Image (cartoon, rainbow, N blue to C red):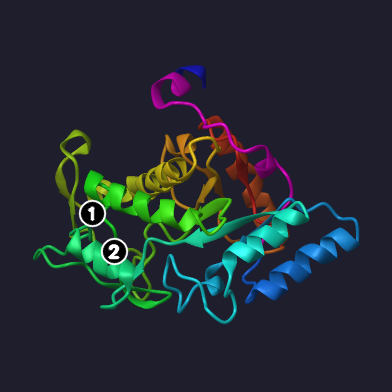
């Protein structure tokens, strides 16, 4: 493990609060519900250090947005959580809704950052918001664009970011991901222009690298906290990970323990299972 760590790098130092108890479910549908849950923990004397926001905080599942009715003032919500000693982590997926007038789609299109089909047009796949395009994180231009969005997003009081669906997951496909024939215009030092089969395994890691950078840009004095569902060897430099959704069954418990131990052997330190 020492030799492996020398080769791929060591885990980034996480913030102290990240080793406490995390409360997460699918899903809290309003600011009021989030505060009620955390206050109930406090009233009953049960420790709770972090609460997690799944996709329902977004406006129509559009990343980098907040629902104006259910989460009208995210900064105020975070301030209230901080006042009772709780941090907040918010989800960001790679699938960006393909919709003219949506500022993330418009800026990404202007900067030409999307993964392409073999014919050179942006690949479109279905995820939570409907038709989505996907940032090409193999390109420094796309990574810088994403990091800038993250930097601005942090101004809402965000303590940590949860990168989910970043295999990348695509609905209504046999493989549950994008076609291997898709084109990535990668940087020369990581392989250059290649199809998706070449870059698939590192897509999630490159996304978390960009997210981590954006959090550093927002506040260099704070340790970033990023959680990722997808990754590769070396991902521990940028993000914690968990073993995906599971059920409260003995079979899933039996599977989860060796998965955690295997990740430790691969030098991941901040790791977890879902406890239903």
Check if residue 21 falls in the magenta segment.
yes
Q: What are the residue bounds of the magenta stretch?
A: 4-24
**Label 1–label 2 contact, CB within 8 A:** yes
Image position, residue 64 (x, y; %): 43, 65
The residue at 29%/52% (across/down) is 145
| Residue 53 visible in the picture | no
Task: Name the disc covering residue 178, or none.
Answer: 2
Q: Considering the numbered disc 1 on the image, is that residue within a helix, a strand or a loop?
A: helix
Residue shown at 43% from the left, 46% from the top: 231
Rendered location of residue 232, percent (x, y): 41, 41
Quadrant in the picture for residue 131: bottom left
Whole-percent x, y for residue 235 in the image: 44, 39
263 shown above or below 25: above
| Structural crowding at the residue carrying mark 2, measured as other residues with C-alpha within 10 Å and reported as few (<14), some (14–19) or many (≥20) | many
Mark sitting on residue 196: 1
Question: With 192 as the anchor, is 84 left or right in this view?
Answer: right
Report which quarter residue 63 is drawn in: bottom left
């Amino acid at each position: 493990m020492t030799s492996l760590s020398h080769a791929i790098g060591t885990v980034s130092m996480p913030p102290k609060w990240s080793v406490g108890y995390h409360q997460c479910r699918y899903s809290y549908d309003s600011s009021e519900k989030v505060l009620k849950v955390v206050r109930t923990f406090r009233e009953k004397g049960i420790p709770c250090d972090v609460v997690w926001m799944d996709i329902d905080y977004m406006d129509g599942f559009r990343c980098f947005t907040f629902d104006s009715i259910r989460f009208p003032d995210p900064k105020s919500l975070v301030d209230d959580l901080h006042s009772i000693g709780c941090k907040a982590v918010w989800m960001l997926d790679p699938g960006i809704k393909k919709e003219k007038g949506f500022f993330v789609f418009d800026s990404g299109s202007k900067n030409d950052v999307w993964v392409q089909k073999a014919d050179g047009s942006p690949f479109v796949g279905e995820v939570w918001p409907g038709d989505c395009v996907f940032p090409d994180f193999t390109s420094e231009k796309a990574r810088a664009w994403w990091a800038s969005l993250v930097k601005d997003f942090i101004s809402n009081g965000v303590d940590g970011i949860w990168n989910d669906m970043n295999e990348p997951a695509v609905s209504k496909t046999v493989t549950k991901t994008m076609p291997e024939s898709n084109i990535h215009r990668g940087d020369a030092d990581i392989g250059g222009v290649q199809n998706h089969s070449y870059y698939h395994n590192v897509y999630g890691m490159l996304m978390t690298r960009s997210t981590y950078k954006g959090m550093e840009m927002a506040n260099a004095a704070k340790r970033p906290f990023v959680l990722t569902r997808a990754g590769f060897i070396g991902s521990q430099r940028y993000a914690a990970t968990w073993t995906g959704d599971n059920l409260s069954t003995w079979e899933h418990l039996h599977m989860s323990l060796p998965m955690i131990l295997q990740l430790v052997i691969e030098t991941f330190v901040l790791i977890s299972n879902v406890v239903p």
